[in-house]
Image: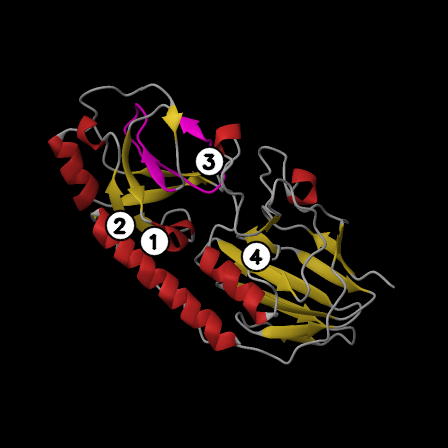
Amino acid sequence: MTKTFFEVIRPGINSTFQDLGRKHLYHVGLPFSGAMDQRNFLISNSLVGNKRDEAVLEFAYQGPSLKVKNENILFAITGNVNFKIKKKKSEIIDGECYKTYLLNKDDELDIISTNQSVYGYLAVSSGFKVEKFMGSYSTTARAGVGGNNGNKILVNQKIYINNAKDILNNKKINFLNSKIEFIRILKGTNFDYFTEKSIKKFFSEDFTVTKLTDRMGMRLKGPILDNNKETNIRSEGLIKGVIQVPADGNPIIMLSDHGTIGGYPKIGVVISADYDKLVQLPPNAKIKFKLVDLNEAEKLFKFYKMETDNLLNQIR
């Protein structure tokens, strides 16, 4: 059987294979990884009829430019993304997110940019032909492990597609990536290390997302948070979304590829229901934090999960 693949004309920025993540491996130094925006990841796979945990191609800011070889490919892109489809006869189609399209042999898909956001997702029917590493397709490029031999997508690379199923009917979902007013957090394990004045500033003033942000962490700039105990503590385990405050007083939020241990005081942790929105904030975006308790965080996560399931059920 002829193998269907994408030829990579331009790899884009930080284009990697991702799925729902690599679970229960913190003890061997491997982070959770997985798609940064899990809701958009799930929607992309559902649109093309894949299993929920099939590998997709995640990209940041600018996506790849790809040319189809040998067979037709059904695909969908999710996020807030500008892209074009270049047909063989020089026809150019402006793409629409949350909708399936059919690419024919030698068509080109040019994923130009994300729009006032960071991450977008490309899913193809039947999925990409990627090997799992320790139970996950997810690429952790800093560690050099995961799909694509632990590497980002490269120019001239061939990205193979699993044997295609029958092409599905066109699917579309109306979905708007909502804006945020606050990022809600729980108290961190070292919340009481910070002065009363710093705690007040943390919840009343804005922080700015800096350019020093990637899949590993998000550095913020804003009011300096003073520590009245220790700026360095004994290293201990970290989780996705935890907010560390180093000696300079500017918070760092640990993201999906974070180190598994750290030695800075932890003022809080972003609740799971707000994580997708957090990671889509581009440099210079403003963040304001709001404190919630565990009971409220659990209710918000249940609502987030119910909303996500309802969206996926609309696609079937």
| The N terminus lies in quadrant | bottom right
Task: Please tell me whether mark 2 sits on a helix, a strand or a loop.
Answer: strand
Image marks 2 and 1: residues in contact by CB distance under 8 Å: yes
Which callout, 3 or 4, points at the residue further toward the start of the chain?
4
Which callout, 2 or 1, points at the residue further toward the start of the chain?
2
Circle 4 sits on which residue?
A: 53
- The kind of residue tagged 2 is Arg
- The kind of residue tagged 3 is His
Q: Residue furthest bottom?
A: 169
The answer to whether 300 appears left or right of 144 in the picture is: left
Q: Residues within 10 Å of mark 3 (few under 14, many from 20)?
A: many
The answer to whether 196 appears left or right of 77 in the picture is: left
Which callout, 1 or 3, points at the residue further toward the start of the chain?
3
Number of numbered discs overlaid on the protein picture: 4
Circle 3 sits on which residue?
A: 258
- Looking at the rendered image, the disc whose residue lies closer to the viewer, 2 or 4, is 4
